[in-house]
Amino acid sequence: MPSSWDSWVAPESQAALTAADFQKAAQKFHASKYLKSPERGGNAWSKKWAPALRKLPTTGPINERILLKTIQSMPEGSAGRRDQGNLIAQIAKSIGLESEPLLAAYRGYGVDKLTERKIPKDREIEDAMKEIQLPHWRWTFGMCAAYGIRPHECADLQWVEKDWITVDENTKTGARKVTPCPSEWVVTFSLRSLPRPTQAATNMAKAFNDALDRDGVTIKPYNLRHAYAMRLMDDGVPPEIGARLMGHSLTVHEDTYKRWLGQERITKAMDRFTL
């Protein structure tokens, strides 16, 4: 039975897919994803897309075997294989090619490869907030803590009803609505009145981390995100809702965050269902 690789039609005629064809397909797919954010797209191209494409042959034919071999040549379980392999698979899929073997090959990256994080307690977050000197970075820290968002997502968020926010679609995991947890931090941290930083999304994370380093704050932004996930679980928020709030899949939510649930949290969660 012929695969969809055999039936892909090149621009001029039925022909073997070439390295040049694949590069053009990558450029077209990239452009379609970053239509509304060319600056962010340029940054993504240099940091992620170009390195992935450099792994492929620059001349000659491109076929399923070559793409699969390229992904499998990357260190198993590495972030590079996960990110670059996924991009190669998505480019192939964008032009109608069979991508399932490629997707299966890159998925060797598992949560057991992640470095365990020190999840800050609420009191530690509140104390750290007081150490941040500039008000716009206090706002960013408070938003990351209360809403579990990524630093770059602070650039274009909007306030909506009942202290919910909307995250812009041109972010890592796309548009979504998010509620604070705990809700009282919106008032405690003055999140509706503090000024926002002026940095674009592409520069936000570095500038924010530099500010935290200058002020001696050791809590990392992504640890604030993990702490938010833990609070959702502590409050009994169903995993599928937690995943939607955080902008990732249910599998990622459960595999990434539940592995850091200590016995104290597990006991507390179970007590809610004990008669």
Image: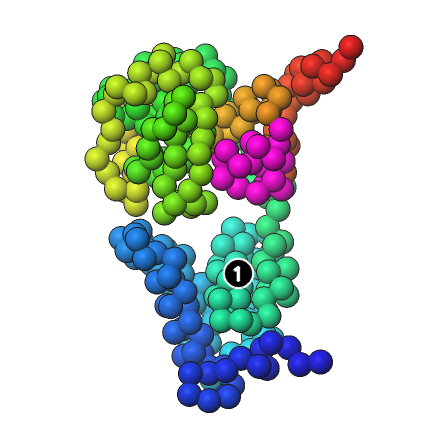
Left or right position of 83 against 162:
right
How many numbered discs, if any? 1
Residue 144 drawn in magenta: no
Q: Position of residue 30 (x, y in %)?
A: 38, 62
Quick check: 65 above or below 206?
below
Whole-percent x, y for residue 201 in the image: 30, 42
Residue holding disc 1: 85
Q: Residue at x 36, y 12 (%)?
A: 188
196 relative to 50 in the view: left or right: left
Q: Residues within 10 Å of mark 1 (few under 14, many from 20)?
A: many
* Nearest to the observer: residue 223 or residue 239: 239
Q: Secondary structure at mark 1?
A: helix
Reply above or below: 161 against 177. above
Query: What scheme was used to colour the molecule?
Result: rainbow
Kind of residue indicated by mark 1: Gly
Q: Quadrant of the C terminus?
A: top right
User: Quadrant location of residue 107?
Assistant: bottom right
Provide the residue span drawn in magenta. Answer: 238-254
Assess whether residue 249 is covered by the magenta stretch.
Answer: yes
Q: Main secondary structure of the magenta part?
A: helix
Is 113 on the left or on the right of 178, as rendered?
A: right
**Residue 80: x and y, percent?**
50, 55
Quadrant the N terminus occupies: bottom right
Q: Is residue 100 visible?
A: yes
Q: Residue at x 30, y 45 (%)?
A: 202
Q: Is residue 253 left or right of residue 146?
A: right
Q: What residue sits 37% from the left and 61% below the top?
A: 32
Instruction: Give the quarter of the image for residue 7.
Output: bottom right
